[in-house]
Image (cartoon, rainbow, N blue to C red):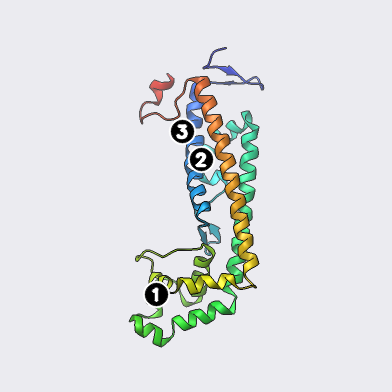
Amino acid sequence: MSKKSRTTAKGHKIGPRIVRAWFDTVINPLLRALETEQRLLKERNWTWRFRPADLELIHPVRVHLEVDARDNLDQCLEFFPNLGMGIEEHDTAVSHLLENCKTLQQTIQENPALREKYEAVTSPEALGKLGVTVNDLFGAYPPADHLAVLAQYIVNNSSELPDYFAPARLWNQHRDAFMAIAEDSSIRPYRDAVDQAGTAALRTVERLTAILRQRRQELSLEHDVPYMVPAGSVQEMVG
C-alpha cells in the first residue's frame, strides 16, 4: 500500500497534502498552545481575568486554532476518535477550572479581610509615604474595580508584578499580606478547589499532548511528511 495514499478503515484515503495541512494548521499549533498551558498550570498561574470572566491563555482546544483551521480539525477527528476524546477531556477540565476561578474571585472579593487590607494600604497616610494617589496605583481601573483587581492577583497566585503594571507598587510591597487572605478558613476550600481543578487540567494537557505527538509521529513516518518545513517549501515537499 502506498504511503502517500493510505486507505483508512472508513474507506477514505489520507495523502501527504492532507497530512501537511493537519500538521501546519492543527497539530503543531495545538502542541505549541498546550506547551504554554502546561507551563502555566505547573506554575499555578491560571491567567484568570475578572473582566471578561475568562482564562486568558488556557482555553478549549478550538479557541487555540485559527477559525479557518477548525474544519481541518474536524476532518482529523474523523480518523482519530481517541484524539476527540482527549480534546473533550481537556476542554471539560478547562471549563471546570474556569468555574472554580470565578467562584474563588467572588469569595475573595466579598471577604471583609480584603477590604480592610485595601483600606489600610490606601489610607492617606500610606499613600503619603508612597507619594501617590489611589488612581496612580490602579491606573485605568475605576475605584469600583480595585478590590476585583486585587482578588484577581490572589486567584492567580501572582508573584511580583513588572513595573509597567499600574498596581505593581502596591501589590509588590504588600503581596504576602494579600496572599495570606486566601488562607482564611472561609476562603481556603475554594482556593483548594481551584488548585485541584488546575492539577486535573494539567493531567489532561499532558495526555492530549502525548496523543498529538504520537499521531504526528505515525503520520510523519507513514506518509513521509516532516513535522515542519521551511516557509515556501510545502509544495516541494508534497508535490
**In this picture, is 106 found above or below 43?**
below
Assign a secondary structure to mark 3: helix
Earlier along the polypeptide chain: callout 1 or callout 2?
2
Task: From the viewer's side, name the closer residue of 150 and 231.
Answer: 150
Residue at the image point whose x is 37% and y is 76% from the top: 136
Label disc, if present, on residue 137 of the rendered structure: 1
> Label 2: which residue?
30
Image position, residue 55 (x, y; %): 53, 56
Determine which residue is flagged by label 3: 24
Measure how far apart labels 1 and 3 are at the Cα level.
44 Å
1 or 3: tag closer to the N-terminus: 3
Place of residue 5 in the rendered image (x, y in percent of width and height, measured from the top left):
55, 17
**Quadrant of the rendering where the C terminus is positioned:** top left
- What's the residue type where badge 2 is placed? Leu
Determine the CA span between mark 1 and mark 2.
38 Å
Q: In this rendered view, identify the residue nearer to me: 68 or 105.
A: 105
Q: Is residue 1 above or below residue 210?
A: above
Q: Tag 1, which secondary structure? A: helix
- In the image, which is nearer the foreground, mark 3 or mark 2? 2
Number of numbered discs visible in the structure rendering: 3
